Image: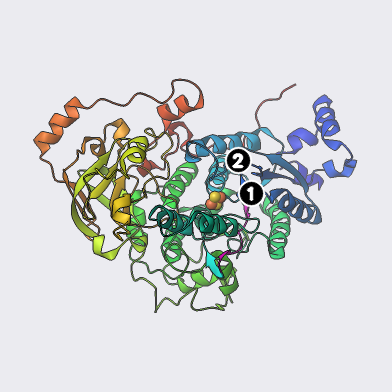
C-alpha cells in the first residue's frame, strides 16, 4: 500500500508524519484502528438521505451495504450528507435548488480526503445534482441508484406514481371519482421504499446513469425493497475501490459517446423530457459539446421499446423482471456506441452480453416497436428562437399539427385563478399558453407545463389540448405539451408577447412553433414590454436569477460550466 499512498489525494491528510497528520488521523479514528489509515483508498459515500426526500428514505441502509463492499475491497468508507431535494415536498420547485445541491456535492468532495466517490441518488433532482457536482471534481465515481418503488395498487390493478395522479385528479375534478376513492388511491400509490415507479424523471435519470456507464449493469431498475438492490450497493462499494486503483475518472467515462448513448436510450425507454436539461448541464460540467439539436438528430427517429407509463402501461418493477435496461441496450446495439467505457472498466457492449428478455410485452424487440419515432422533438420558430421541446410519445397524434387561438395566463397564479371559470373563453381547439414559469420567471422552471385542462372542457370529455410554456413537465406526465421555450418570457422572449386570441401554429413534423402575428406588431409589443419584478434581491434566489442560463443550455449557472479539478487546496491549520 505504501507505493499507492503517494498517488492518493487522501495521503495529503492521513499519510503525513507531522502535526497535520496527527490532527487528521486522530479526529477521524474514533474507534478505527491505525491500519485503516495506511494509505488505502478513502471512499466518500455521498448520501442524499433525508426524511424530507421520501424517495431516498432508505439510503442509510443502502450506505451500509456500500460500506461493506468498500471494506471488503480494502478501502476506507466515509459517509457524508449533502443537500437533498424532495420532489413532492419542496417549494417552489426542486429545480431551483439542483445547482445549489451540485455545488454542495462538488465542494464537499473537493474539500475532503476522498479518493473515490459513491453517489447515492434517487428522487428526480438528486441524480443530476450529484452527477454535476462530482463531475466538476472528476474523481473516480460510481452511482448507486436508490431504485423504484414497487408497483402501486388500487382496486386490484396497478397504478403508477405521477401518471395516475394526473388522471385521478382530472377524474376527481370532473366528478368521476369520489373523495373516498381518491383517498384509497392515495394510500395504494406509495407502498414501499423507492422513487416513482413510472418512467418518470427519477427512473429516466437512473437509466441515463446506466446508459452513461456510471453504474453497474442493471443498476437502474432493481426495485428499492428488493434485496438485490443491496447486493448492487455492496458490489459498487467494492468496485469503486478498484476504480481508484485504476484511476478511472468520471471524465474518462463521460465522453461524447456516452452522452449520445444516453440520448438514444432515452428515446427507446420513453424517458422524461427533464433529461434534456440535466444531460446538457452535465455535459457542460465535463466539457463535452452537446446541444438541443443533438436530442432531435440522435433520438427523434428512434423507436419506443419499453411499455412503461406514462407512454405505456407497465411499471419499473415489471421492467426489472423483464430484464431491465441491459435488454434495451442490446436491442439498440446497432445504433449505440457499444465500445464506450463504463465504470466496470468494460465497454457498454461487454456489460450487457447475455442479457435476456423475460417479457416481450414489457420490452419489445426493435423490429416490432411500440412507436416508430419516439424520441423528443425540438421545435424552432418565432415563438422559441432558442428552441423548445415536445415529447411526441406522450402527445395526441391528432394534435401534432395544430393551429389554434391562444388563451394566455401570465403567471401560475393567474392560471389557477381562471382555469375553471365558466367565463373563460376557451374551447378544445384553443392553445393554452403559460408565461413566466421558466428558470428566471418562476424562479426555477417548475413542472407546471402540463397544466390541467379547463373544468368545463374536462366535463365535456376533452382529455388533451396543445399547451405551451417556458416551464418543464413531470416525467410522469403526458399530453401535447410544448416545454422549455427559450428564451423564456421573464427575460423578454417572444412567449411574453403572446396575447389572448393570437393564432399559434404547432407543426411537430416540420419542427415549427409559430406565433402568427406580424413582425411589426411583435416589435411594438416588445417595445412596450416590462420585465416582471424580481422574486428576490438577496440570498440564493438572487444568485440564481443573476446566473442561471436558459433551458437550451441546461439551466446551469454560467460560472459552473467547464471542467474543474480535484486539486487539494491549502491547509486549514
Ligand atoms: Fe421522488 Fe417522484 S417524487 S421520484
Query: In this rendering, does residue 448 appear at all?
Result: yes
Mark 2: which secondary structure? loop
> Is the residue indicated by label 1 positioned so its CB lies within 8 Å of ligand 1?
yes
Other-residue count near label 2 (Cα within 10 Å), few / some / many at <14 / 14–19 / ≥20: many
* The C terminus lies in quadrant: top right
Q: Position of residue 158 (x, y in %)?
A: 54, 67
> Is the residue indicated by label 2 positioned so its CB lies within 8 Å of ligand 1?
no
Tell me the CA gap for discs 1 and 2.
Answer: 9 Å
Nearest to N terminus: mark 1 or mark 2 = 1
For image coordinates 44% across by 68% down, the residue present is 312
Mark 1: which secondary structure? helix
> Magenta span covers which residues?
140-155
Query: In this rendering, does residue 257 appear at all?
Result: no
In the displayed structure, 365 sits above or below 264; it is below
The disc at residue 84 is 2
Q: Position of residue 466 (x, y in %)?
A: 27, 53
Q: Is residue 141 magenta?
A: yes
For image coordinates 83% across by 25% down, the residue present is 19
Is label 1 in contact with label 2 (beta carbons under 8 Å)? Answer: yes
Q: Position of residue 8 (x, y in %)?
A: 72, 42
Residue located beneath label 1 in the image: 56
In the displayed structure, 405 sits above or below 103; it is below
Amino acid at each position: 500500500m505504501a507505493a499507492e499512498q503517494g498517488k492518493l489525494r487522501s495521503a495529503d491528510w492521513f499519510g503525513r508524519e507531522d502535526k497535520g497528520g496527527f490532527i487528521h488521523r486522530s479526529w477521524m479514528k474514533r474507534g478505527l484502528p491505525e491500519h485503516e489509515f495506511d494509505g488505502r483508498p478513502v471512499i466518500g459515500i455521498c448520501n442524499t438521505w433525508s426524511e424530507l426526500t421520501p424517495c431516498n428514505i432508505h439510503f442509510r441502509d443502502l450506505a451500509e451495504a456500500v460500506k461493506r463492499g468498500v471494506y471488503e475491497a480494502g478501502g476506507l468508507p466515509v459517509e457524508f450528507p449533502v443537500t437533498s431535494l424532495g420532489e413532492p415536498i419542496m417549494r417552489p420547485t426542486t429545480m431551483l435548488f439542483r445547482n445549489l445541491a451540485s455545488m454542495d456535492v462538488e465542494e464537499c468532495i473537493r474539500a475532503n480526503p476522498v479518493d473515490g466517490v459513491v453517489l447515492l441518488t434517487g428522487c428526480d433532482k438528486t441524480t443530476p445534482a450529484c452527477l454535476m457536482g462530482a463531475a466538476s471534481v472528476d474523481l473516480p465515481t460510481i452511482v448507486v441508484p436508490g431504485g423504484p418503488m414497487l408497483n402501486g395498487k388500487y382496486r386490484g390493478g396497478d397504478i403508477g406514481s405521477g401518471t395516475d395522479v394526473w388522471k385521478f385528479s382530472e377524474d376527481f375534478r370532473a366528478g368521476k371519482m369520489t373523495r373516498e376513492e381518491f383517498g384509497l388511491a392515495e394510500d395504494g400509490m406509495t407502498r414501499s421504499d423507492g422513487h416513482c415507479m413510472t418512467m418518470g424523471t427519477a427512473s429516466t435519470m437512473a437509466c441515463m446513469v446506466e446508459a452513461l456507464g456510471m453504474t453497474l449493469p442493471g443498476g437502474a431498475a432493481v426495485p428499492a425493497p428488493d434485496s438485490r438492490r443491496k447486493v448492487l450497493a455492496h458490489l459498487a462499494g467494492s468496485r469503486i475501490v478498484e476504480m481508484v486503483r485504476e484511476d478511472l475518472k468520471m471524465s474518462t467515462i463521460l465522453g461524447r459517446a456516452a452522452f449520445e448513448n444516453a440520448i438514444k436510450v432515452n428515446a427507446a425507454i420513453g424517458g422524461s423530457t427533464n433529461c434534456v436539461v440535466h444531460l446538457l448541464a452535465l455535459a457542460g460540467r465535463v466539457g463535452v459539446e452537446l446541444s438541443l439539436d443533438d436530442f432531435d438528430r440522435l433520438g427523434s427517429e428512434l423507436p419506443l421499446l419499453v411499455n412503461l407509463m406514462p407512454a405505456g402501461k407497465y411499471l419499473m418493477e415489471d421492467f426489472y423482471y423483464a430484464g431491465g435496461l441491459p435488454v434495451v441496450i442490446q436491442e439498440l446495439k446497432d445504433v449505440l456506441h457499444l465500445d464506450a467505457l463504463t465504470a466496470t472498466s468494460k465497454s457498454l457492449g461487454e456489460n450487457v452480453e447475455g442479457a435476456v428478455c423475460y417479457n416481450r410485452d414489457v420490452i419489445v424487440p426493435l423490429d416490432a416497436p411500440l412507436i416508430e419515432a419516439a424520441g423528443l422533438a425540438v421545435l424552432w420558430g418565432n415563438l422559441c428562437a432558442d428552441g423548445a421541446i415536445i415529447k411526441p410519445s406522450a402527445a395526441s397524434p391528432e394534435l401534432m399539427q395544430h393551429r389554434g387561438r391562444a388563451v394566455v395566463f401570465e403567471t401560475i397564479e393567474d392560471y389557477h385563478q381562471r382555469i375553471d371559470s365558466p367565463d373563460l373563453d376557451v374551447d378544445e381547439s384553443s392553445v393554452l399558453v403559460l408565461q413566466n414559469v421558466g428558470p428566471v420567471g418562476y424562479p426555477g422552471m417548475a413542472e407546471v407545463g402540463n397544466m390541467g385542462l379547463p373544468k368545463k372542457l374536462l366535463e365535456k370529455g376533452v382529455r388533451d389540448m396543445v399547451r405551451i410554456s417556458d416551464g418543464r413537465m413531470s416525467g410522469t406526465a403526458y399530453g401535447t405539451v410544448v416545454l422549455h421555450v427559450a428564451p423564456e418570457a421573464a427575460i423578454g422572449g417572444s412567449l411574453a408577447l403572446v396575447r389572448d386570441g393570437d393564432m399559434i401554429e404547432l407543426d411537430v413534423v416540420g419542427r415549427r412553433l409559430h406565433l402568427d402575428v406580424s413582425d411589426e406588431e411583435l416589435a411594438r409589443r416588445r417595445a412596450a414590454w416590462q420585465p416582471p419584478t424580481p422574486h428576490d434581491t438577496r440570498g440564493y434566489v438572487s444568485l440564481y436569477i443573476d446566473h442561471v442560463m436558459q433551458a437550451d443550455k441546461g439551466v446551469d449557472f454560467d460560472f459552473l460550466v467547464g471542467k474543474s479539478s480535484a486539486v487539494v487546496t491549502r491547509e486549514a491549520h
